[in-house]
Image: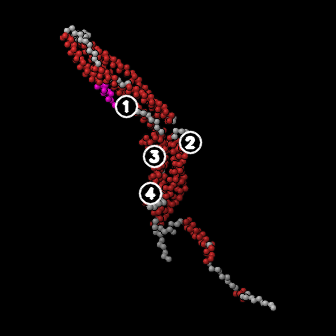
């Protein structure tokens, strides 16, 4: 029989390295399953909290459904990672590892879909809802300020109306002094100018009455906004605060609509159109044909000026109406889970923690795969008998003895063994007759 070559120093070091790693793995296996179970249970607890926030009913059936879902999640996470912790480090081919990597990626996505987002909702759900309330307040504040700005711009038309009115009053005074038609007094031209001045004066007074209403509406809106801001940061359950926040939002939406209706720009536009279209021409009262001709020419000039001023006033009103209106803002109540997804960028740490508690075992899978690969690399080239420890050698010898004893006791072995020959003593053989023939008596 050929004698086996002794193991080299490099192979001996590799075997010792592999045995050392195996010893560490043996110790780690004593609590790895417990640790994985703790992670799975913790994820299930947070999943239960997330599911509970989605259920409207707080009855026993809803609680049972939430518990059942969280238990299923915990079991699924434990079984999934237990499979990978055992199988992934054991496979050696690239194809098998790529297949298990694909399964691990698919399973991780499933875990995120069924558990991680609910964990994030449990961790940051209330804060996400408060973020939604704060953003809604900002939207309403922008809408209120924009509506107030448009209303103030419309109120600014009062100055344009006053300027046109003043111009007609000045012309009427000039006509009374005889500077326009050449006829001093309060004749036909004077009455036309006073007629339009009175119309503009009434429009100016109507605009002025809107100013206190606009200011009061804006002040009330700011008070509502202040209350809404307080609701976003007050202590207590966010669900109860959301109910009052919704009521305040409805009030503020109605107030913004009222501010839009208080804009006098449409009224000024219609008044400007009527300013030149509805002129009641008085009868010319000049005593002579020449005087009546002068009055007619003056009235024609006044009407031209009136049309120009009306066009200017109409364009000013149209400019106000063409201002971009405030964006429509509506408060929509939202659940904590939906809020976490909607404002995910603001809660990255919570999302990271929720995902990490579910996918942390993936790191353990990689660690085990690397360690098993190192063990196989350390044992490469060494014979089987060289890798046996003293305990394994004793167990092997005991197994060989047990097998040998079992074979000795087997019926087939007993039949095959020859019968042992008994040694015969020579003296006894001489004294003992080999055959005795009985004597027959007659």
* Mark 2 vs mark 1, CA separation in Å: 46 Å
Categorize mark 3 by other alpha carbons within 10 Å: few (<14), some (14-19), many (20+).
few
Identity of the residue drawn at 37% across and 28% down = 147
**Tag shown at residue 199:** none
> Element under label 1?
loop
Over which residues does the magenta segment extend?
Answer: 315-325
Residue sitting at x 21%, y 11%: 292
* In the image, residue 348 above or below residue 294: below
Q: Residue furthest bottom?
A: 442
Image position of 339 (left or right of 276): right
Which mark identifies residue 352? 3
Q: Which residue is rendered at x = 52% and y = 66% of the image? A: 388
Dot 2 or dot 3: first in sequence order is 2
Q: Are marks 3 and 4 in contact (CB under 8 Å)?
A: no
Q: CA distance from mark 2 to mark 3?
A: 32 Å
Q: Main secondary structure of the magenta part?
A: helix
In the rendered structure, the answer to whether residue 122 lies left or right of residue 148 reads right
Residue sitting at the far left: 290
Q: Residues within 10 Å of mark 2 (few under 14, many from 20)?
A: few
Nearest-to-viewer mark from 2 and 4: 2
Residue beneath label 4, please? 99
Q: Position of residue 90 (x, y in %)?
A: 48, 60
Residue beneath disc 1:
326
Q: Is residue 318 magenta?
A: yes
Sequence-earlier tag: 2 or 4: 2
Q: Residues within 10 Å of mark 4 (few under 14, many from 20)?
A: few
Q: Earlier in the sequence, mark 1 or mark 3?
A: 1
Q: Which disc number belongs to residue 61?
A: 2
Vertically, is 136 above or below 172?
below
């Amino acid at each position: 029989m050929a004698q086996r070559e002794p193991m080299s120093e490099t192979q001996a070091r590799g075997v010792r390295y592999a045995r050392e790693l195996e010893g560490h793995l043996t110790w780690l296996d004593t609590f790895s399953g417990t640790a994985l179970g703790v992670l799975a249970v913790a994820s299930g607890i947070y999943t239960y909290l997330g599911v509970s926030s989605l259920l409207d009913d707080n009855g026993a059936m809803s609680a049972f459904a939430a518990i059942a879902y969280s238990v299923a999640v915990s079991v699924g996470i434990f079984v999934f990672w237990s499979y990978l912790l055992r199988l992934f480090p054991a496979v050696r081919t690239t194809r098998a590892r790529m297949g298990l990597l694909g399964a691990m990626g698919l399973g991780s996505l499933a875990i995120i879909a069924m558990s991680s987002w609910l964990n994030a909702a449990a961790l940051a759900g209330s804060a996400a809802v408060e973020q939604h309330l704060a953003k809604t307040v900002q939207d309403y504040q922008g809408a209120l300020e924009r509506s107030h700005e448009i209303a103030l711009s419309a109120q600014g038309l009062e100055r344009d109306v006053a300027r046109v009115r003043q111009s007609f009053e000045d012309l009427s005074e000039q006509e009374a002094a005889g500077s326009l038609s050449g006829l001093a007094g309060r004749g036909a031209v004077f009455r036309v100018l006073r007629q339009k001045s009175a119309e503009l004066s009434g429009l100016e007074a109507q605009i002025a009455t809107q100013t206190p209403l606009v200011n009061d509406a804006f002040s009330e809106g700011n008070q509502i906004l202040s209350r809404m801001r307080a609701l976003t940061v007050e202590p207590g359950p966010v669900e109860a605060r959301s109910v009052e926040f919704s009521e305040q939002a409805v009030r503020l939406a109605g107030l913004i609509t009222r501010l839009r209706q208080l804009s006098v720009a449409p009224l000024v536009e219609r008044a400007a159109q009527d300013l030149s279209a509805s002129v009641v021409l008085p009868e010319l009262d000049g005593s002579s044909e020449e005087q009546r001709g002068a009055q007619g020419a003056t009235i024609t000039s006044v009407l031209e000026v009136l049309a120009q001023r009306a066009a200017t006033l109409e364009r000013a009103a149209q400019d106000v109406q063409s201002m971009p209106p405030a964006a429509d803002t509506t408060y929509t109540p939202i659940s904590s889970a939906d809020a976490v997804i909607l404002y995910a960028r603001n809660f990255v740490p919570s999302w990271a923690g929720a995902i990490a508690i579910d996918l942390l075992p993936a790191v353990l899978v990689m660690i085990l795969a690397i360690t098993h690969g190192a063990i196989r690399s350390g044992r490469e080239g060494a014979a089987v008998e060289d890798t046996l420890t003293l305990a394994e050698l004793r167990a092997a010898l005991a197994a060989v003895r047990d097998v040998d004893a079992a074979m000795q006791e087997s019926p087939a072995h007993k039949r095959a063994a020859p019968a042992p020959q008994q040694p015969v003593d020579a003296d006894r053989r001489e004294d003992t007759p080999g055959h005795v023939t009985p004597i027959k008596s007659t």
